[in-house]
Amino acid sequence: MTQVRSLDHVGVVVDDLEAATEFFLDLGLERDEAAPVQGEWVENIIALTGVRAEVVMVYTPDGGTLELTKFHTPADDQGPQAAAANRLGIRHVAFRVEDVHAIVGKLQGKGVNTVGKVQDYEGTYRLCYLRGPEGIIVELVEQIGQTGAQS
């Protein structure tokens, strides 16, 4: 039986590629250089014509990958939607971090707001949702105690 072997990457479409990239760099990710994407091969994959885009890959220290894409053509005519956390579809990306409060403080100094409050969960995790550029929701997960799986 054929099965999934691993998660390769998550794609996030943005209008302001530089602001989105900077947001993820502020979280501690690293980046590759921006690369142009266009041509029949990508048009066939995503079922759009006249594609001209720019992509920046950002990476977590353990190799997790986000693909940030700015479509120059065809352009999105609806703009970013800052959807609530309960909207159907992929709604957030979560990162394990060492210090939620330090990251929140750093990003609030740059104008990034939390969606709700920093919250401890059953003495095991400290959690927080941040709203980044263009409505992107990022969850920060800090392990603060032992979980049941770690005896």
Image: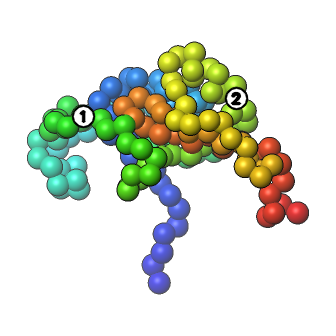
Rounded to the nearest angstrom, the CA distance separating label 2 from label 1 is 31 Å
The residue depicted at 55 percent of the width and 31 percent of the height is 114
Q: Indicate the amino acid at tag 2.
A: His
Q: Which residue is mark 2?
A: 101
Residue 58 position within the rendered picture, expressed as x and y whole percent measured from the top left: 48, 36
Residue 101 position within the rendered picture, expressed as x and y whole percent measured from the top left: 70, 29
Sooner in the amino-acid sequence: mark 2 or mark 1: 1
Residue 54 visible here: no
Choose between 35 and 47: the one closer to the eye: 47
Residue 79 visible here: yes
Q: Which mark is drawn over residue 59?
A: none
Q: Secondary structure at mark 2?
A: helix
Q: Is residue 11 above or below residue 134?
A: below
Q: Based on the displayed image, in which of its 4 quarters is residue 147 positioned?
A: bottom right
Residue 1 position within the rendered picture, expressed as x and y whole percent measured from the top left: 47, 84
Furthest toward the top, the residue is: 109
The quadrant of the image that shows the C terminus is bottom right
Residue 27 position within the rendered picture, expressed as x and y whole percent measured from the top left: 58, 30
Q: Residues within 10 Å of mark 1 (few under 14, many from 20)?
A: few
Choose between 18 and 54: the one closer to the eye: 18
Q: Is residue 35 above or below residue 62?
A: above
Q: Residues within 10 Å of mark 2 (few under 14, many from 20)?
A: some
Q: Secondary structure at mark 1?
A: loop
Q: Which residue is mark 1?
A: 79
